[in-house]
Amino acid sequence: SDLMPRLENVLSIVSLRAPAYAQHLLPIWLRDDHEWLANLLPEFAALRTMTIDRLRRLPWLKLEPQAGTAYVWPDVSALKMKDLAVAQALMKGAAVLVSPGYQFGVQGDGHFRLCYARDEKEWADALDCMVDVLDALALDRGLEGKM
């Protein structure tokens, strides 16, 4: 059990982030596959909008949407919980894996990173479950519930 947090950090660095080899290939993919990219961008835009709209149902959650990424970085510090505990609650209660903010350094405390590059139907259901889990955590801590 002492080794698992270290293994999780290694896994997050080598497989869940954008490793250097993938960054070197990305320009080739973007340059050579215009049709694929043209079809993908509207899908990602719709998933981004859906994700932001669902998370904004939680009035206590802070969210500044980013451009040019398939991730959001919700601030859940109002819960007054470790971001790892929030991530574990989302995994257990909503079956969604997020990256707890501590993995990104001290500035990540109270946040988590969420990738929305998913199948739209499955993602809609997962988002609803996530909002329910986060709402339950907030209600347990005396915060205002969903709008």
Image (spheres, rainbow, N blue to C red):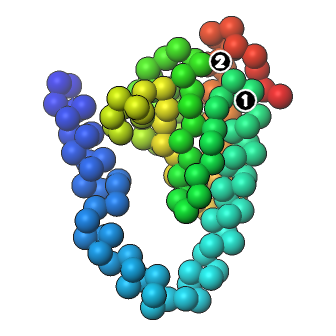
Q: Is residue 144 visible?
A: yes
Q: Are marks 1 and 2 in contact (CB under 8 Å)?
A: yes
Q: Position of residue 80 (x, y in %)?
A: 53, 14
Q: Amino acid at mark 1?
A: Leu
**Would you place residue 110 above or below residue 123 in this image?**
above
First in sequence: mark 1 or mark 2?
A: 1
Question: In the rendered view of the protein, which quadrant contains the N terminus?
Answer: top left
The residue singled out by tag 2 in the image is 138
Q: In the rendered structure, which amino acid carries the disc numbered 2?
A: Ala
Q: Residue furthest left?
A: 3
15 sits left or right of 42 in the view: left
Q: Residue at x 76, y 34 (%)?
A: 57
Q: Quadrant of the C terminus?
A: top right
On the image, which quarter does residue 59 sit in? top right
Dot 1 crowding, Cα within 10 Å, few <14, some 14–19, many 20+: some
Residue denoted by label 1 = 58
Left or right position of 111 against 18: right
Q: Secondary structure at mark 1?
A: loop
Task: Please tell me which residue is depicted at 64% across the width and 53% down the height of the picture.
Answer: 123
Between the residue at mark 1 and the residue at mark 2, the CA separation in whole angstroms equals 9 Å
Residue 38 in the image: x percent, y percent? Answer: 62, 82
